[in-house]
Amino acid sequence: MAHLSVDNVDLSFETTTVLTGATLTVDQGEVVAVLGPSGSGKSTLLRVIAGITAPDAGTVTLSGDDLTHVPTHQRGVGMVFQDNQLFPHLTVGENVAFGLKMVGIPAVERRATASDWLARVGLAGFDSRQVSALSGGEAKRVALARTLAVEPRIVLLDEPLTGLDRELHDRLARDVSDLLADLAITAILVTHDPDEAATIAVRSLHMDDINE
Amino acid sequence: MSALPRRVIAALSIPPSVGLAVFYVWPLLTLLFRAIDGDAVQTTLGRRATWEVAWFTLWQAVVSTLMTLVVGLAPAYIVARFNFRGRQLLLGLITALFVLPTVVMGAAFLALLPDGMNQSIAAVIAAHVVFNLAVVVRTVGPLWEQLPSDMEGAAATLGASPWRVFTMITLPLIRPALVAASSIVFIFTFTSFGVVRVIGAAGTRTLEVEVWRQAIQLGDIRTAVVLSILQMVMLAAVVMCSSRAQRRYSQPLGLEPSARRMPQRGSERRQVALIGFTSFAVCGAPLFALAARSFSTPSGWSIAAWTQLGRTEVRPGIRLGIDPLDAVRNSVENALWATLFAVVIGALASLAIAAARNTGRFLDVGMMLPVGTSAVTIGFGMLITFDQAPYDWRAEWWLVPIGHALVAVPFVVRATVGVLRSVDPQLHAAAATLGASPTRAWRTVVVPFLWRPLTVGATLAAAISLGEFGATSFLSRSDSETVPIAIEQLLGRTGSLLQAQGYAMATVLAVVTIALVAAVDRSHQLRTLARSTVNGPN
């Protein structure tokens, strides 16, 4: 049975139609890439799955639960944003621990978990750094650690590697791929780069295939 | 703008410098020197009543500020985040309230709340809150509008409920603007004078009101001087703390271009509609009540208050000494003179500031000083300075307009200097290469740019003068009341016709002020000016 299924989702903003009958299924543990040019509705699709944007019609189901009307914070859907969206008023460690705090894990424990995650993405010892002092690649790794630390049921990656230079891009793509494989986590990667899709994902889809 | 000959710059800066020295610096120094009378300081500071007034001033300002923040966040949120029908109207209404004269705002809340409840501390605080909503909406709103909304989305995907997103992400991120807004609101409410006087609730005396009461009603200048200094010291302490807080809470934010959008889901639409309607009601009700009460008499609706505005006799043979039409005449005359003084002084100062570059900074800072001084302090300082021959000017017709001009000049300068500074130096060089002498080149190139900002400045000066109450309370003579003074007196009398007349005059003043400010609001200057406030130092 499909882990995630998006069924017949329609969405339009004021005058532009973004999604029409969008349909997508992803199996448990599968990493799927969604390709398409900018403006094709890839990011919007992820927002609908995360519950940040409400669809006009259609449903989103995750392991059998209809999530369509469940608020974002109760969905268990993790998301890495294109521009990271790290919280500038919190340290790196506090950023990674944020989700753990939301589920009520005690301070000592969540600091330890955050440290582990930072080490796992190659940023051991970064806990007390300021977000504003991070390089582009480091910020990306922190965003990844922050999302994975809460062990979401599915991870959405919105153009996570866009804007990095070639060398950094390729290395991060491999790291992300290894990390997702290690965790055996279900993920959707949105990108416009077929190579990146091939490196990280097992299966690639085009927005044209998803929209009706 | 380019270099003028030095002596021209010097000539330009003499009138504003002398004006500032005589009518601002000298009175302020007089105030300070009078306070160095050890006896008065000891007696005044030793009085329990002094500290009661100081304590009331402080706590009502703290409560007013906190409530303004709490109430203001909701409209700030919808205005920052959403496009909806009536958005511009709501912003306009909130701004219009902010530019109202303090006396009118006091009158509006006196009119709004039922008798028995309206002369209360609650009414004073409610008036302060509605008055200053614009500070929160217009300071916090722009920052909020540019916060990446995805950051809140990111927190939600990490399991944060909407409330926790607000308290743990949004609130800390808009904190710099909140701190800035609260220090502005605090200064306004700490120095509140007109609102408190008009509402006139028992036990509500701010330091400003007490300075006036001691000086004008009780004739105790020595006590008033000490209180005035105490007020300045407390205010300076607050300003220092707040600027420290503002530095502490400033942080790099990844601001994005505004992403205002139509409210989406049903719940979002309901939320925006609820906040929108409530804000309209809260902001519109005082103005509506003001107008309505001018038609209300114990025996029903009537236009008597309006038709009898010109009559001084309330009953045959009984005169009250307040002539509304006379007050209108005085106010208009004052406003014309104040505008003329403010524009001439402001224009000269602006030209000198813009032409002199670095050395102009002194004059620039000097001309802004009156904004940082309460109008009560300005008026009181002038009152005790110009009371001895050969400087006994208290009876001179021009003293009130000069006091008003002092309050208005900073706005004229701010409106003008920026425009002058942006005049392309190339134009001036071009004129020079065509054979124009420096002064002639300047006259051809720079002066044409003066008219627009000066019109804006003049309009604001007129609005400020018409509504000015703080300085006027000290300077106006009893036979030449201005409109705000007449309003305060009429509302303080018993008798429904007199009160209705007070409300009628307040309505007129509200309409005129809003019209004047709206006339210049289209030009960009006002958006910044309105933020730094038209009636700031009242």
Image: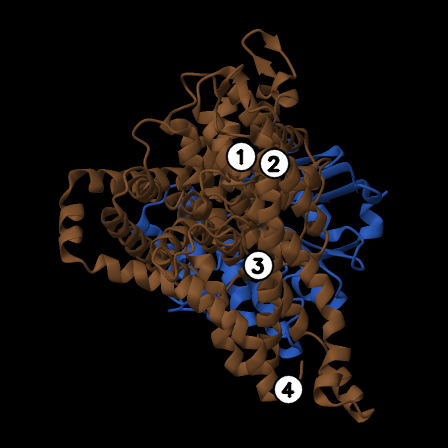
Determine whether label 1 and label 2 are within 8 Å by CB.
yes
The label number, if any, that marks residue A48 in the structure image? none
Q: Given the image, what chain letter belongs to the residue carrying mark 4? A: B
On the image, numbered disc 2 is attached to which residue?
A: B510
Quick one: SS at disc 4?
loop
- State the CA–CA distance, disc 2 to disc 3: 20 Å
Disc 3: host chain: B
Q: Colour of chain A?
A: blue
Name the residue beneath numbered marker 1: B104
Any part of residue A187 in sight: no
What residue does disc 4 label?
A: B3
Whether the residues at callouts 3 and 4 have beta carbons within 8 Å, the answer is: no
Alpha-carbon span between mark 1 and mark 4: 45 Å
Q: Position of residue B516 (x, y in %)?
A: 67, 45
Identify the chain drawn in brown. B
- In percent of the image, x 76 and y 34: which residue is there? A56
User: How many numbered discs, if any?
Assistant: 4
Q: What's the coloring here?
A: by chain
Q: Secondary structure at mark 3?
A: helix
Task: Kindly indicate whether the residues beneath marks 3 and 1 are on one polypeptide chain.
Answer: yes
Q: Earlier in the sequence, mark 4 or mark 2?
A: 4
Q: Which circle's residue, 1 or 4, is located before the other in the chain?
A: 4
Discs 1 and 2 share one subunit: yes
Outermost residue to the top: B299
Which residue type carries mark 2? Ala
Q: Nearer the viewer, residue B208 or B386?
A: B386
